[in-house]
Image (tube, rainbow, N blue to C red):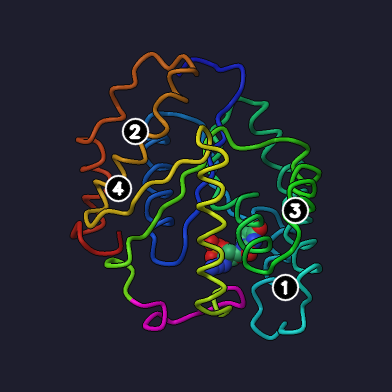
């Protein structure tokens, strides 16, 4: 693959059951098959320090964690992963795929917890040193596919925050879609995960054109079929 001057940074957002993990893994696999140098990261986490912070944030015993402390911990983990991993990777022309980034803070701590959106935006920009994803894919789960949140086993402190909290978080993501239509793209989770994958590819294709990749025919549905072949039926686990 031709050397690029700068890498590509794509973040994924989406709630429980949206298929975020399945889809990001498939994308990473596809990019690796094509010899791209790709890093798959998650937030909070992705560094030793960030993973320790993640443990604090998601620990169901930490019921007394204050919303401002929660916000600062997310931002601390973010500053660490940006300085230690993301910024150097982008400078080395790598492709970075990150499960969640600044938009989660805007939606969860801003809309969910009710903290100042202005404060969050300036803290996000401080933590990232201005490094934002080139594209963000928000996987939107239609209600008929989501089943009820109550039927799913909640496993961490944020997931346990309740339906009203998560409804506000969703509103936050919709606000971002309206505010940053160029970067922040909504993809509806389809019944067949290969269709969802194709819809994601359609939203990121231009980033690879800009990279000068000679052949983008790889962003084709037939490849998506192969990628999911191993995972069994197309209707499970979106
Ligand atoms: P994952 O489950 O996607 O790894 O994310 C961990 C939780 O952290 C997730 N919980 N839920 N649902 C969203 C939450 N989160 C925030 O509240 N703020 C943030 O800034 C980030 C990055 C994640």
Snapshot quadrant of residue 4: top right
Residue at position x 57%, y 52% in the image: 100
Q: How much space separates mark 2 and mark 3, taking CA atoms? A: 30 Å
Magenta residue span = 148-158
| 187 part of magenta stretch | no
Instruction: Out of 28 and 14, give the one closest to the viewer.
Output: 14
What residue is disc 2 on? 202
Q: Dot 3: what SS?
A: helix
Q: Are marks 4 and 2 in contact (CB under 8 Å)?
A: no
Residue at position x 43%, y 57% in the image: 21
What residue is disc 4 on? 196
Q: Are marks 3 and 1 in contact (CB under 8 Å)?
A: no
Q: Is mark 2 within 8 Å of ligand 1?
A: no
Instruction: Out of 161 and 1, give the one closest to the viewer.
Output: 161
What residue is disc 3 on? 120
Q: How much space separates mark 4 and mark 2, taking CA atoms? A: 10 Å
Q: Measured along the vertical axis of the image, is residue 233 above or below residue 98? A: below
Residue 225 position within the rendered picture, expressed as x and y whole percent measured from the top left: 21, 43
Q: How much space separates mark 3 and mark 1, taking CA atoms? A: 20 Å
Along the polypeptide, which appears first: circle 4 or circle 2?
A: 4
Which class describes the residues within 10 Å of circle 2: few (<14), some (14-19), or many (20+)?
Answer: few
Q: How much space separates mark 3 and mark 4, taking CA atoms? A: 31 Å
Q: Is mark 1 within 8 Å of ligand 1?
A: no
Q: Dot 2: what SS?
A: helix
Q: How much space separates mark 1 and mark 4, taking CA atoms? A: 33 Å
Q: Are marks 1 and 4 in contact (CB under 8 Å)?
A: no
What residue is disc 1 on? 56
Q: Are marks 2 and 3 in contact (CB under 8 Å)?
A: no
> Which quadrant of the frame does ligand 1 lie within?
bottom right
Asked whether residue 219 is in view, the answer is: yes
Q: Main secondary structure of the magenta part?
A: loop
């Amino acid at each position: 693959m031709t050397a690029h001057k700068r890498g590509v940074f794509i973040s994924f957002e989406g709630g429980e059951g949206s298929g975020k993990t399945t889809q990001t893994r498939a994308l990473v696999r596809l990019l690796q098959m094509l010899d791209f140098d790709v890093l798959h990261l998650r937030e909070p986490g992705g560094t030793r320090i960030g993973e320790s912070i993640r443990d604090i944030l998601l620990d169901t015993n930490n019921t007394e964690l204050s919303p401002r402390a929660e916000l600062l911990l997310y931002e601390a983990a973010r500053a660490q992963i940006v300085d230690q991993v993301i910024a150097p990777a982008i400078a080395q022309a790598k492709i970075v795929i990150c499960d969640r980034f600044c938009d989660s803070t805007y939606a969860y701590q801003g809309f969910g917890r009710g903290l100042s959106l202005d404060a969050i935006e300036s803290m996000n920009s401080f933590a990232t040193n201005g490094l934002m994803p080139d594209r963000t894919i928000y996987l939107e789960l239609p209600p008929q596919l989501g089943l009820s949140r109550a039927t799913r086993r909640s496993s961490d402190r944020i997931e346990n925050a309740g339906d009203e909290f998560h409804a506000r978080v969703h509103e936050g993501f919709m606000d971002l879609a309206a505010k940053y239509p160029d970067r922040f793209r909504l993809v509806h989770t389809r019944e067949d995960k290969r269709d969802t994958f194709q819809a994601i590819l359609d939203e990121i294709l231009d980033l690879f054109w800009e990279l000068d990749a000679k052949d983008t025919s790889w962003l084709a549905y037939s490849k998506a079929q192969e990628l999911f072949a191993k995972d069994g039926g197309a209707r499970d686990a979106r």
